[in-house]
Structures are given as C-alpha cells and as structure tokens.
Amino acid sequence: MDVCFSLLLSFVAAVFPMVAYMAFIWWMDRYEREPLWLVASVFFWGAMGGIVLGCLGTKLLDLPTSLVLDSKARSALQTVLWAPISEELAKGVILVLVFWNRQFDNLTDGIVYGSATGLGFAMTENFLYFIQVWQQHEPAGWLLNVVIRTGFSGVTHCIASAAFGATLGVAKFDARGLGRVALPCGGLALAMAVHALWNTLVLATRSGGGAYLLLAMGATAGEVVLLMVLLQVSLLRESRMIRVELAEESKGGNIPAAHLGVLPFYFRRNRPGWLPASVDRRRYVELATRLAFRRAQARSCFEGRRKALEEEIRSLRLQLHHLLGALLPPLEPTPGPPAVPPGEPPMADLVP
C-alpha cells in the first residue's frame, strides 16, 4: 500500500507542475499558437526519448574516464559535464526535426518547442527522483526535494532547451549564410552551460552548504526573467510584423483597412463587436494572421520553399474573400490568354 501511495503521489508531483508550465508557455504564444498535437509530441519525446538517449549518452561519455578516475571523481564529472552535454543533445534532437516543419516560424515557436522537450524531460526525471527520495527520506525530505526540483531543477531543463530552440527559431528566417549554422551551435552550447551551472552549484551545495543552493536558485530565477522578457520582445515583433504585412494586403483589397487597428493586437482582436455576426471571427483572425506570417517567411525562406509559401498565400487570400464576402471588393481574376474576338479564327489556325 505504501509503495502504491508513493508512486501515485510522486506521479502527481512530477506530472502536473510540468504540464501546467507547458500550458502557460503555450498560451503565451498568443498570435499563432502551435498545434497542440505537435507540442505534445515534442513534450513526450523529452519525457521518453530524451531520457533514454540522455542516459545512454552519459554512460558512453563516462566509459573512458572509468579507466583513470575513482568513483567520486567520475560522479562529479558526470554531473557537471557529461550529463549537460548528453541530455541537451538528446532533448535537442526533436527540435532539429521540428525545425523543418512549416509550423516552426520564429523565435517564439523555438521557445515553445524548446520548453516542451525540456519540461517533458524534467517530468520523467523528477518522477524517478521522487520515488528514490521517498524510499530514502522522511516525508519532509521528500517534500523539500519536490519543491526544489519542481521550482528550479525542472525549470532549468526548460530554460536550457528553450535557449537552443530560440536560436533555431532565429536561424530559420532571420539569419544569413554561416549564421544559420553558427547561431544554433551557439544556442546548444548555451543550453549546456545553463545546465552545467545548475548541476555544478547543486554539487557544491553538498560540501559547501546552503549558500551555493541559494545562488543556484537565484541564477534560475534570473534566467526565467530573461526568458520571459525575450518571449515578450518576440511577441511584440510578431505584432509589428502582422501590422506591416496586413497593411500591404489591405492595399491589395484583401483586408479591410478598418481592421488594421485590430488584427495585430491580441486583446482587441478577441473582443466581440468589430465584425458582423455573420463572419466567423476566430476563423478570420486565424487566416489573416497566417497570411501575415507566410508573407514574411516568403521573403527570407530557402529558395526551394518559396513557391509553396506563395501558393499558400494565394489560397489564404481566396479563403479570406470567401469568408468576408461584401466586406471586401471583388477579387480580381487571374490574368489569362486574351479572348478571341467573335468571328475571328483562333491564332493557332492562322499559323501556316
């Protein structure tokens, strides 16, 4: 009975905070939220694949040192070096794959997907630690471990992976030349450094007292603030991009000019009353926002993807005209071959 209770309590303590963190970060991506199925897939990769690859990688990196170091030195090296390297690589695998998905647009998306793999990893790792601590300590010790790992250790996994994801997001459309490779490499190194800093300070706590733990907590809190500021800056950039791109679409008759003061702003666009009741507001906002994003991407994407983006842009314009109806001027027909005047033979018949 005690075993079942400890498993259930550890499961709840590990799962619910990480899922809540993830839900909050997903909600923060307010202009073009990522598909839940894709975010969940990245989260579960971190929880399963990331854990397995991370553990295997740490063991492999530890093999050479096992021949020359004692167990205490090996354990310290694993904590401060091998684990950050292998675990960040394992979590980052899924981010490199999602990078090529058309849903992955910019820095904001990189933070969302990076947070997902990091929080998934933290969820499983926390669960394993909570079970172990329950068996070795009194309930007070278990509760202290839950607080530290939920509020700081798990959050560090989130921040580290989000740093790598953010650099991938910038590299996809904003970087040029070697920057498209150098920037993600730098982001991965930063993720490893953030992870290693936390592990080093926690390891120092075991011999140096609580001062190192307080320093580790303070560092994590500062990193959270920086991540939230970065996310807000990215969201402001998205709002400005939507305003600029839709202003161009308005000149072409695809967006009513009166809506340019509404669509780029999250709270305004979600208020009722600025559209006729016959128009599906949620659908309209979704189409207009996607059109703005695709326009911006088409100017800076790889050459091979530009044609597909241009086709999607044309499709989005048609859908907007169908949805808004009389709110927009008639869509101009696509130019075609000149009509043959009545009574004249086709041009093909005039060729000798």
Image (cartoon, helix red, strand yellow):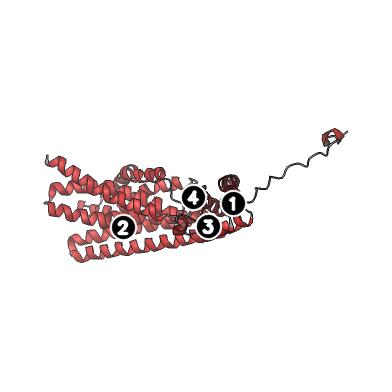
Residue at (23, 58) in percent of width and height: 203
Name which residue type carries label 1.
Leu
Q: Work out whether mark 1 precedes mark 4 in sequence or the reverse, and give the earlier one.
A: 4
Query: Can residue 80 be seen at all in this image of the molecule?
Result: yes
Query: Can residue 188 be seen at all in this image of the molecule?
Result: no
Name which residue type carries label 4.
Arg
| Residue in the foreground of this view, choosing between 190 and 259 | 259
Q: Distance of mark 1 from mark 4, alpha carbons?
A: 13 Å
Q: Position of residue 239 (x, y in %)?
A: 49, 60
Element at label 2: helix
Quarter of the rendering containing residue 79:
bottom left
- For label 4, the residue is 281
Quarter of the image where the N terminus is located: top left
Element at label 1: helix
Instruction: Check whether the beta carbons of the residues at disc 4 and disc 2 lie within 8 A of each other.
Output: no
Marking on residue 327: 1
Q: Distance of mark 2 from mark 1, alpha carbons?
A: 56 Å
Marking on residue 242: 3
Foreground disc of the pair 1, 3: 1
Q: Position of residue 22 (x, y in %)?
A: 34, 51
Q: Position of residue 70 (x, y in %)?
A: 21, 52
- For label 2, the residue is 196
Q: Work out whether mark 4 precedes mark 2 in sequence or the reverse, and give the earlier one.
A: 2
Quarter of the image where the C terminus is located: top right
Q: Distance of mark 1 from mark 3, alpha carbons?
A: 20 Å
Element at label 4: helix
Q: Distance of mark 3 from mark 2, alpha carbons?
A: 38 Å
Q: Work out whether mark 3 precedes mark 2 in sequence or the reverse, and give the earlier one.
A: 2
Badge 3, how many Cα within 10 Å: few under 14, some, many 20+?
many
Instruction: Check whether the beta carbons of the residues at disc 3 and disc 2 lie within 8 A of each other.
Output: no
Foreground disc of the pair 4, 2: 4
